[in-house]
Image (cartoon, helix red, strand yellow):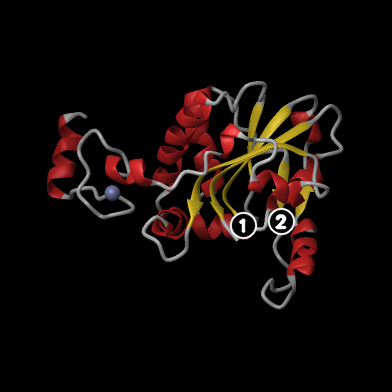
Amino acid sequence: MNWWSRFLDFISPRQCAICGRRLMPTEHSICSVCLLHLPRTNYQLTPYNSKMAQLFWHLAPIERAAAFYYHESHSETASLIYKLKYNNRPDIGEDIGRVMANEMAVAKYFDGIDALVPVPLSRKRMRQRGYNQSEQIARGISAVTLLPVITKALCRKNFTKSQTALNRQQRQENVAETFELRDGNLLRNKHVLLIDDVCTTGATLIACANAIKNIEGIRISVLTLSFTKS
Ligand SMILES: [Zn+2]
């Protein structure tokens, strides 16, 4: 840390994005205690048949699936995703992406992967937020694994119908209409790792995978920051 960062830290202390405690100069957006206590899924140890992988069976040709930790709404850790998405904190995504990549790499989760593909945001949402949180997570993973991040292959269209009025199957179909392949050549003959922030029903990842599955020689795996247990 240089003197300028120390000075900024002195006049405006940085706080942990989960517990709010003052961060040490060596800590990034989350303190070491909170990092240690994130409820890990350890799905990277059983990537082909975890509870998350089972969501995709018969619905999309997804090989490996893992998430870093369990998302529990109303818990302290839920504020992490909230800040990442709605509080203009893209740095959280990159920081936690790095932490997650280091742990996943121990289980050889990135072996054979050629590229990281963050789930895109629609142009409208991107304008509102200023950044794509999934791309930020992918940047952090890339810093550790040196895998390229590909953002130009896939795009997302704005929703036409409100999601809330639809049942689960309709919702899945509605999402399915929203991803469009822009440049399949970028992913040809590659094993891609789709990156997203949260996985709940798996509908978004299924829609993404189905939008790219017909590209020649493609293989698809997924990795998300958190997984919501149903
Ligand atoms: Zn903390």
- Say few, some or many: other residues with alpha carbon within 10 Å of mark 1 (under 14 / 14 to 19 / 20 or more): some
Image marks 2 and 1: residues in contact by CB distance under 8 Å: yes
How far apart marks 2 and 1 lie (CA) works out to 8 Å
x, y percentage for residue 157? Answer: 72, 57
Q: Which mark is residue 215?
A: none
x, y percentage for residue 16? Answer: 28, 49
Residue underneath mark 2: 203
**Quadrant assignment for the N terminus:** top left
Residue found at x 65% / y 47%: 52
Residue found at x 50% / y 57%: 129
Residue found at x 54% / y 26%: 107
Depth check, front residue: 89 or 102: 102
Kindly state the secondary structure of the residue where label 2 is placed. Answer: helix
Task: Relative to 180, say whether 142 is above or below.
Answer: above
- Say few, some or many: other residues with alpha carbon within 10 Å of mark 2 (under 14 / 14 to 19 / 20 or more): many
Q: Which mark is residue 200?
A: 1
Depth check, front residue: 141 or 11: 141
> Is residue 150 in sight in this rendering?
yes
Depth check, front residue: 223 or 37: 37
> Is residue 31 in sight in this rendering?
no
x, y percentage for residue 120? Answer: 64, 48
- The three-letter amino acid code for the residue at tag 2 is Ala
Task: Relative to 214, say whether 132 is above or below.
Answer: below
